[in-house]
Image: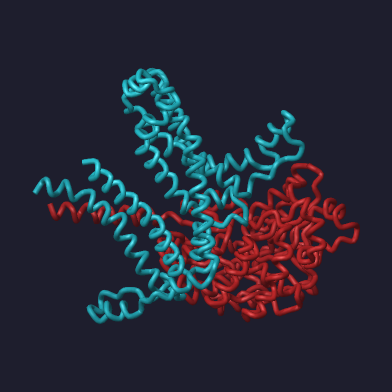
Amino acid sequence: MKRFGLISVPYLWLLALFLVPFLIVLKISLSDTALAIPPYTPTLDLSAGWAGVREWLSGLDMENFTWLTEDDLYWKAYLSSLKIAVLSTIFTLLVGFPIAYGMSRAPDEWRPTLMMLIILPFWTSFLIRVYAWKAILSQEGFLNQLLMGIGIINEPLTILNTNTAVYIGIVYTYLPFMVLPIYAALERLDESLLEAAEDLGCSRLTAFWLITLPLSKQGVIAGSFLVFIPAMGEFVIPSLLGGSKTLMIGKVLYEEFFANRDWPVASAVAVILLLILIIPIVLFQRNEEKQREAGK
Amino acid sequence: MKKSWLMMSAALVMGATAATADEVRVYNWSDYIDEELLTKFEEETGIDLIYDVFDSNEVLETKMLAGGSGYDVVVPTGSFLQRQITAGAFQPLDLTKLPNHGNMWDVIAERTATYDPDNAYSINYMWGTTGAGVNVAKVKEALGEDAPIDSLALIFDPANMEKLASCGVHILDAPTELIPAALAYLGENPDSHDPDVIAKTEPVLTAIAPYVQKFHSSEYINALANGDICVAVGWSGDVLQARDRADEAENGVEIAYNAFKEGSLMWFDQMAIPVDAPNPEAAHTFLNFIMDEHNMAAASNYVYYANGNKASQAHLEEDVIGDPAIYPTEEALGTLYTTTPYPAKVQRVVTRLWTKVKSGT
């Protein structure tokens, strides 16, 4: 009984914080808008008993999902978000891997300090850090002044309110999520493997390629998911740093919710977004399991 | 066991009501009050005032329609108020608790009754127009001495906008105000709800969008004052606040506000009490405090918006009551138009058009 209780904790957690909210969103996505509180119909009236439930069910339909296919705005926004999320994940990996590698190679007594430096920015609010980037990237900002001061450019660069600024913002914000899992994987790496490789005539580069990289694969994959998933639905960074031309699904969702007051369509957009994110994760996990079984 | 649990929850409930009994939560537009009034309210009434701000009607409306916002007083604009009343978001005012209600100005009350019949749910806080704020020197430099600073052509003629782009143009991120303005420019009825007529504004707005630095509803105050931009389509009082800030900074920036001669939107920001307000009693106290002629005058003198309070006019400073940009002349009042809320299907067309204009998609 006690063991059962312990096992059920994560499932209850998943049920309460993921499944139930998802079902509520799914239910709203099947409703229609209404001028009321809350602004959709039908709402479930339990006091009417079974008749109420039946009436509620008959009011639900797929209309909002059909609507999403009729306007090219939505798939363009999904594609654009996908592109931004994939590219920023790659950039974050390119920046994050060397950092994690450097940390794992650093002398033991330095590591807590280095770890601290990675975590330190989290002590400041995320919003304030993104705002700080506005000041750095603007026309009169720190970056342009620096570049003009050392004579690299003559005219200030327009970075703020473009997609470039969004990439910078995402890479900066999610960097620790990439560095920490890779560092954890690299730190566990048994150095005698590398020594053995060199003894057997491997160059350091080949050893890195054949041993370090494959053994850090789990960290890289975990880090990439931790960056990709939130980047896909990102709203704050594109709305603060991006321009009006930055099309992302998070912004479309906001417009549906706030400007159109269309909770059902906003919910449909969210359901599709979730499906887009869940499918690759499930495929990936299946692949992992297959590999593990093949390994046995 | 059961008993103590009951007693505990009873104590909690009582604690909660005790906490709200002397607390009022107000949700108003940003940069929209003299903050000394907030302290004055707390001192006079002993009620704790929690004051939050927003910068778009959409954000407020979403909170109202979701219900349970926790606010006691909110300030939607007329057309939004009308829709929220229909949705059942507000409670009728209890005039017996508002002795200062007699101070209100019938001229404005007649107009706000379009949105709120008999003004049963709301009082007017401020009203104003949506027009153009310009940095006079920079605009003249770009367009010449006879620059059309009081005409819709300033922003809707691409030839003008092309020249203004380099000194910076901001436009309100408010489709429900810019589409009526574009309709007025085209000579159509600004309050048209016909999707085909609304669609006519798309080429006009798309043509000027490349020259707009930013669509935003509050950043232009600072940007104008600092001289970062030369034109802002914005709200009258906000532009005048920018003018004031530039004067105080003595940075040589001269800002002017004009309503458009072809017609500008006249809007009314109304104070109302949500139907589920935790403390309607204190909300009435707050409304009554705001309707006091001295307090209302202090607010207008500070934010440079006209108010709907007749009695306060005696206490307004000359640069407020005497400025036709704030209190338009009888003749200018005639050119101003008002709008009514779009039905949901038309609202979708409007938002979609606006997204297309801003993002090109």
Q: Residue farthest to the front?
A: A201
Q: Depth check: A33 or A294 in front?
A: A294
Vertical placement of A189 versus A168: above or below? above
Q: In percent of the image, x 46 and y 54: which residue is there?
A: A233
Q: Position of residue B246 (x, y in %)?
A: 75, 47
Q: Colour of chain B?
A: red
Q: Colour of chain A?
A: cyan
Vertical placement of B318 versus A117: above or below? below
Q: Is residue B70 left or right of residue A145?
A: left
Q: Is residue A57 left or right of residue B309?
A: left
Location of the C terminus of chain B by quadrant is bottom right
Residue B287 in view of the camera? no
Residue B169 in view of the camera? yes
Q: In percent of the image, x 43 and y 30: which residue is there?
A: A100
Q: Position of residue A143 (x, y in %)?
A: 65, 35
Q: Position of residue B77 (x, y in %)?
A: 59, 67
Residue B169, picture quadrant: bottom right
Q: Is residue A226 left or right of residue A56?
A: right
Q: In percent of the image, x 63 and y 81: which residue is there?
A: B194
Q: Residue farthest to the left?
A: A1
Q: Residue farthest to the right?
A: B145
Q: In percent of the image, x 74 and y 47: which residue is there?
A: B228
**Callout count:** 0
Residue A109, picture quadrant: top left
Vertical placement of B359 versus B347: above or below? above
Q: Depth check: A128 or A58 in front?
A: A58
Q: Position of residue B91 (x, y in %)?
A: 46, 71
Way the structure is coloured? by chain
